[in-house]
Every structure is written in C-alpha cells, then in structure tokens.
Amino acid sequence: MAYKYLLLEKEDGIGILYINRPEAMNALNTDVLKELGQAAADVAADDEIKALIITGAGDKAFVAGADIKEMSALTATEGREFGITGGWAFRQIEKLEKAVIAAINGFALGGGCELAMACDIRLASDKAKFGQPEVGLGITPGFGGTQRLPRLVGEGRAMELILSANVINAEEAMRIGLVNHVYPVESLMDEAKKLAKKIISNAPLAVKFSKAAINKGIQTDIDTAMSIEADLFGICFATEDQKAGMGAFLAKEKAVFKGK
Ligand code: HXC
C-alpha cells in the first residue's frame, strides 16, 4: 500500500522500510505510527519480503523521537492513547515472523531508540547517537523504552540512560549491548543487507521458530521457556527443510530450503 511518511522498497527478498520525514528528523507523529503498524501487516503478508531492514531517510536521523510538536498539546488521556498507538505499532514490528534489522543511520532518540529496540538486531553507523531524553521534556519513555532498554542492557544501565537523559555515541551503545555492530556510515546499508541475506539463506521456518522461542521465552520463567523451546525444536522435524538441511550436510552438498 502507499504511505505518506514511509517508503517500502524490495530488493532480492529483503524489504527496506524508510521512515521518510527528513524535514522533521523522521519524528513519529500519530500518522507515522499508524503507517508503521500498517507496514508491519503489509510486510507480514508479502511473500517476496523474507527479512526487513528499517532505517531513516536523509543523512541525519534514524528517528529523533516522537513528535514533540504534536505531544506538546496532549491531555493526559490523549497522551495515554499516543503511547498506546506507538506501543502497538512497535509490537507489530517485534511480532513479525521475519527477521527485522534496524540500520541506525543517525539520531535514535526517545521513540527512535525505542523503535530500534523493537527490531531484532541493531546495526549502527559511526554517526549514530542514542538516548532516552524524555525526562528532560517532562515525560517518561512511552513506546516501550522503560521495558525493552533494561531487558537489552540491564537495569542499572537503563536507569542511568533514562534518568540522566544522556545521549551516547555508537561505540558506547555497542559497549553496553544496545547495538551489535558499528560501521562507517557509507557501508551501513551494505552491511545490513549482507546480514539480511545471510539470515534468509537459512531455513525460513527454523529462523521463524528461533525468533519466536527467544521472544516468548525471554518473557517467562525458565521451565516454561524450555518447554516452548522443546516444542518448537520438535516441530522442526516435521518440516521438509530439516530433511533438506541435514540431508545436504550428510551428502556434503549445499542445502536448498523451501520454507516448508
Ligand atoms: C518534532 C522534531 C523532532 C521531534 C527534530 N525535529 N526532532 N520535531 N519532534 N522529536 C525538527 C526540529 O524542530 C526542526 O524543525 C527539524 O526537525 C530539524 O531539527 P533541528 O533541531 O533544527 O536539528 P539539529 O540542530 O541538527 O538537532 C538535531 C536533534 C534535535 C539533536 C535531533 O532536533 C533534537 O534534540 N530533537 C529532539 C530529540 C528528542 O528530544 N527526542 C525525544 C522526543 S520524546 P524546524 O521546523 O525548526 O526546521 C519521545 C517520547 C517517546 O520520543 C514516547 C512517547 C509516548
């Protein structure tokens, strides 16, 4: 479908979704958030897209946060609704049964850092900057930052970032585990595509089940989580891809996967 604030391109099985509002540093207003939720559904339904990269249009920002102009006039009820809209949109991205890579090309502040955290894997350019500046605006993070940041970097580091509103560079973000890799800005998209290609060369159902096992398991106790893992591991043996993968190994050939 056509979007006003997003651009969705397809290239060799990879979807590339640009947040496309560069005149406002790709800030997230209600319309952008609704489009993001819709885009997640569109990507889910599109068999040509096997993995997704999310990045920011322009050369300055991934996303510089939720739209401060829109938020400035909200009532408490509207603020809650705004938070829920963003939380819903990001959860649609997180729940996609395809790998999602954030290619963080510049500022990832507030809602931008929260969007990156809803993706499965974060790659940053050496120009990227990260932070949760909300408390400096008189608000809390509201698109999942208080929940995903401690899960990713630990409670102490999340407390420091959120309570101080400090902005950190890409190297520091990598040191604390907020991003996986840092690349020169010119090679960021190539590296993101390379990783996406590597992921989609594997057995699609095994990739999907692995993502589900991690995402479901991390939210529950270890016994339930191990049982989720056992169920998904077991289901793999009902797939053609398991036979193709193991058969190819034993025959010293390269596996051809069908996603069945
Ligand atoms: C609305 C924004 C914006 C934002 C930038 N712009 N960030 N508009 N919301 N979050 C707009 C500016 O107003 C300006 O518009 C244009 O984009 C260019 O920005 P500049 O500030 O002129 O650029 P620069 O000097 O390079 O500074 C870049 C920046 C700065 C450091 C990223 O823009 C900045 O600090 N932005 C706000 C970052 C922030 O606090 N984010 C968290 C928001 S709270 P004009 O019209 O003047 O050209 C949040 C809460 C999430 O995200 C949870 C909600 C429930």
Image (tube, rainbow, N blue to C red):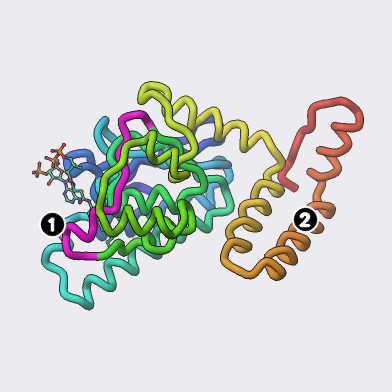
Q: Is mark 2 within 8 Å of ligand 1?
A: no
Q: Residue furthest bottom?
A: 77
Q: Which residue is mark 2?
A: 233
Q: Which residue is mark 1?
A: 69
Residue 88 image point, x, y percent: 40, 64
Relative side of 56 to 10, left or right? left
Asked if the residues shown at circle 1 and circle 2 are in contact, with their CB atoms under 8 angstroms apart, the answer is no
Residue 4 seen anywhere in this rendered image of the structure: no
For label 1, being within 8 Å of ligand 1 is answered yes
Question: Where in the figure is residue 19, as x and y percent of width and height?
Answer: 32, 43
User: In this orientation, does residue 71 appear?
Assistant: yes
**Precedes in sequence: disc 1 or disc 2:** 1
What's the residue type where badge 2 is placed? Phe
Front-most of residues 180 and 246: 180
Query: What is the x, y in percent for residue 63?
Result: 29, 45
* Residues rendered magenta in the picture: 125-139
Name the secondary structure under disc 1. helix
Q: Nearer the viewer, residue 259 or 107?
A: 107
Residue pictured at 37% horizontal, 63% vertical: 146
User: Left of 172 or right of it: where is 181?
Assistant: right
Q: Is residue 242 left or right of residue 20?
A: right
Image position of 12 with respect to 258: above or below: above
In the image, what residue type sits under mark 1?
Lys
Q: Is residue 137 magenta?
A: yes
Q: Residues within 10 Å of mark 2 (few under 14, many from 20)?
A: some
